[in-house]
Image (spheres, grey):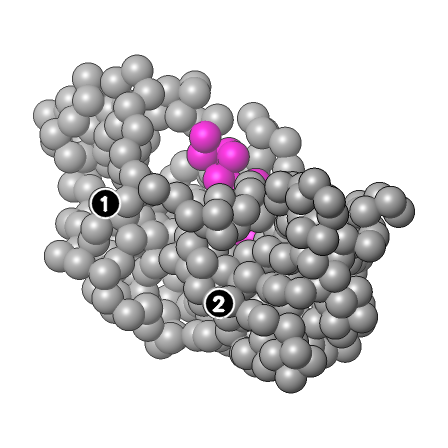
Amino acid sequence: MMTTDERYMRRCLQLAQNGRQNAKPNPMVGAVIVASNPHHPSPIPPRIIGEGYHVRCGQGHAEVNAFASVRAEDEPLLKEATMYVSLEPCSHYGKTPPCADLIIKKGVKRVVVGCIDEFAEVQGRGIQKLRDAGIEVTVGVLENECKALNRRFFTFHRLSRPYIVLKWAQTANGFIDDNGKTLAISTPFTQMLSHKLRAEEDAILVGRVTNEREHPQLTVRQWDGPNPKRLVIDRQHPLNMEVLHAHHIQSLIVEGGRKTLDSFLEQGLWDEIRVETNTRLTVSGGTRAPQLPADAEVVAQHDYDGNVIISYRSQQAPRPICWSPT
């Protein structure tokens, strides 16, 4: 059964996802303020008096927007309120003042945090500041879900490289082309989902052969959102993770051919794999789809009218090494 803290943290996660497009490069964060009035002659049960999320980088954080949404008549309830926030409140001055300071100023009684912020300027300092001010702090409610929501942000700051998504489509008998010729494996609907993914990630990469043979546009044409940065690599133009980090690229889709995909797989340099299989399409031969690593764990599976998309994540600790062509 879901606890009260988990229920309100779940709402924080729902709110946070509204910032998926515009919060970058900041993390997605949601905040909820829950209050009751135990001193009233007829005690009022807990209710949400404010909520918000981080809408856009450079603008108010989730906590700021949650406090701003509290009605004037509910302001006195803040002294008995609990603030739920999916990510540790910041404690440093960036483009906006520290949220931990604002929480202390507002005088809430308790703060529930989904997960600690691994960003070097935070890393527990916001929680400690709240505790030093006498605020009760609970940490780790729906921690795995909160970490998963911002796994790109955490990977970028912890490993100094983008979160890497390997992606390919294959026939029912495991080929990615038809005897070397380009093959339409995706349906119009699953192609739309691919464009949705592109809109959510920062960059997309293919190898030289795929670029010259297929001339892929690698753009968002069937979904609303920005086009990812286009990257083409070969031995003369290898991928430099430090350069991607310097350009604040937090996530990378690899849609290259077998050789490019194998280069990432062989070095264990991946965080997620998405494989689309057209269960009604077979060919007599061609390029075999890459072999899934032994540590690939299924995290999602969906059937879209015969095309099955399976998402995998690694069970091993992610690697910070630089990619090099093989």
Q: Which amino acid does label 1 sit on?
A: Val
* Marks 2, 1: nearer the viewer: 2
Q: Mark 1 points at which residue?
A: 298
Q: What stretch is highlighted in magenta?
A: 193-203
The residue pinned by badge 2 equals 139
Asked if residue 89 is positioned above or below residue 13 in the image, the reply reads below
Please state the horizontal and vertical placement of residue 23, each as a whole percent of the image: 67, 53
Where in the figure is residue 73, as x and y percent of width and height?
87, 45
192 sits left or right of 167 in the view: right
Q: Give how far across and how far down residue 40 sits, in percent.
A: 74, 47
Seen in the picture, residue 281 relative to 295 is either above or below; the reply is above
Report x, y in % for residue 41: 73, 45
Q: How crowded is mark 2: few (under 14 residues within 10 Å), some or many (20 or more)?
A: some
Residue 195 counted in the magenta span = yes
Q: Between 221 and 93, which is closer to the camera in this rendering?
A: 93
Residue name at image x 34 percent, y 58 percent:
271
The residue at the point 59 percent across, 56 percent down is 84
Under tag 1, what secondary structure?
Answer: strand
Amino acid type at image mark 2: Val
